[in-house]
Amino acid sequence: MKIAITKERRAHERRVAATPDTVKKLIALGFSVAIEQGAGEASRIPDSDYQAAGASIESDTANLLRDADIVLKVQRPLLAGEGDINELALIKRGALLIAMLSPYADPAAIIQYAQAGVTAMTLEFVPRITRAQSMDVLSSQSNLAGYRAVLEAINVYDRAMPMMMTAAGTIAPARVMILGAGVAGLQAIATARRLGAIVSATDVRAASKEQVESLGGKFVMVDSEEVKNAETAGGYAKEMSDDYKRRQAELVAETLKKQDIAICTALIPGRKAPTLINDEMVHSMRPGSVIVDLAAEQGGNCTLTKPGEIVEVNGVSIIGLLNIPSRLSADASALYAKNCLNFITPMVNADKQLAVNWHDEIIAATVLTRDGDIVHPNFKPATAA
């Protein structure tokens, strides 16, 4: 059984899908592991470290992928016309392709996975159940994104974060508002509090109140019966009614006027990111304020966000950087690689043979294509009546 780990070629991507530690464990499971030359460089992992862990280094991508039974990646492979090589075309039929494939962002690619005969498994769809916590790539990467978002804000914010009492006078602490109290939002709250800020947070899920307050934040929320059903079975926020959105927007608008930093983290799987901060709200914020939009890649929570850029509007800096976890590539790779290892481990039987249980709820939730067909219910072509 051979696992191949390729170099990531998509823009803004610095992570890698394996570390020397996970390579050792994959080899112990019975796999041989081959790494594309230079795959770990952006995550501070030299080829020599992989070799010391027992992996082979391959300079030719075609040779690397030709006989791989499992291909591990961070992002989806390049397709024809997307780069210097067509990575998908190099993967053998029947191989397992395991990565964050972003199927909602590029549903047309799913058709190509099926045509290529690969079994495409997207790790973003790992269900949020107890047994799968160690495989949850969204949580591991969002945790780092929330931390980094605060640091990105501080880098632009031209004042101090904590209260400082000096002989020359007192510096007031920064006021930080977190919009969306999921994994990223909670880590942003914890980070901002550690740095001395006064933190408030909002979320449509009533269950978030206790979590926010346990971290020292003030919870800001519209009181409505609708919030009782604002969370999906998978733990994600649902899209709310227009009336709720209006009332929430009014509350956020009033709160934002008093804030120095706002960090937006709200995402709904398969949908454009909900608008939380509109043009008028931005203009109501004080000059020197900062907005960090972690939803920039899905359209942004702020209407004035420009994906991939830092812009200034009426004295307010709006940070729309892409792929925030990749800006912590060493730690993000370590966590992601462990998620991948934990996902693969149950697929190996006592005889060290690949034996995938296709009926397992974790596997079934992640498989997009198999045996040349699109099998995921969210993407299956509609059948004629």
Image (cartoon, helix red, strand yellow):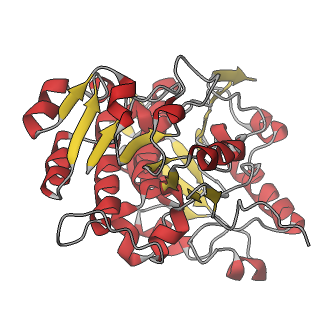
Quadrant of image for the C terminus: bottom right
In terms of depth relative to the viewer, which is nearer, 100 or 349?
Answer: 349
Residue drawn where x is 15% and y is 50% of the image: 27
In terms of depth relative to the viewer, which is nearer, 145 or 250?
Answer: 145
Q: Which residue is most to the right? A: 385
Residue drawn where x is 41% and y is 31% of the image: 327
In terms of depth relative to the viewer, which is nearer, 364 or 231?
Answer: 364
Total labels: the figure holds 0
Counting from the top left corner in percent of width and height, residue 316 is at 68, 28
Residue drawn where x is 63% and y is 64% of the image: 375
Residue 229 in which image quadrant:
bottom right
Q: Which residue is most to the left? A: 52
Q: Is residue 150 visible?
A: no
Residue 250 in which image quadrant:
bottom right
Compared with 184, 34 (above or below) is above
Compared with 47, 203 (above or below) is below
Residue drawn where x is 67% and y is 21% of the image: 311
Compared with 376, 319 (above or below) is above
Q: Is residue 107 left or right of residue 235?
A: right
Q: Is residue 62 left or right of residue 320?
A: left
Q: Is residue 338 left or right of residue 14?
A: left
Counting from the top left corner in percent of width and height, residue 45 is at 22, 29
Counting from the top left corner in percent of width and height, residue 285 is at 71, 36
Q: Is residue 50 left or right of residue 288?
A: left
Q: Is residue 211 visible?
A: yes
In terms of depth relative to the viewer, which is nearer, 384 or 281?
Answer: 384
Counting from the top left corner in percent of width and height, residue 211 is at 47, 70
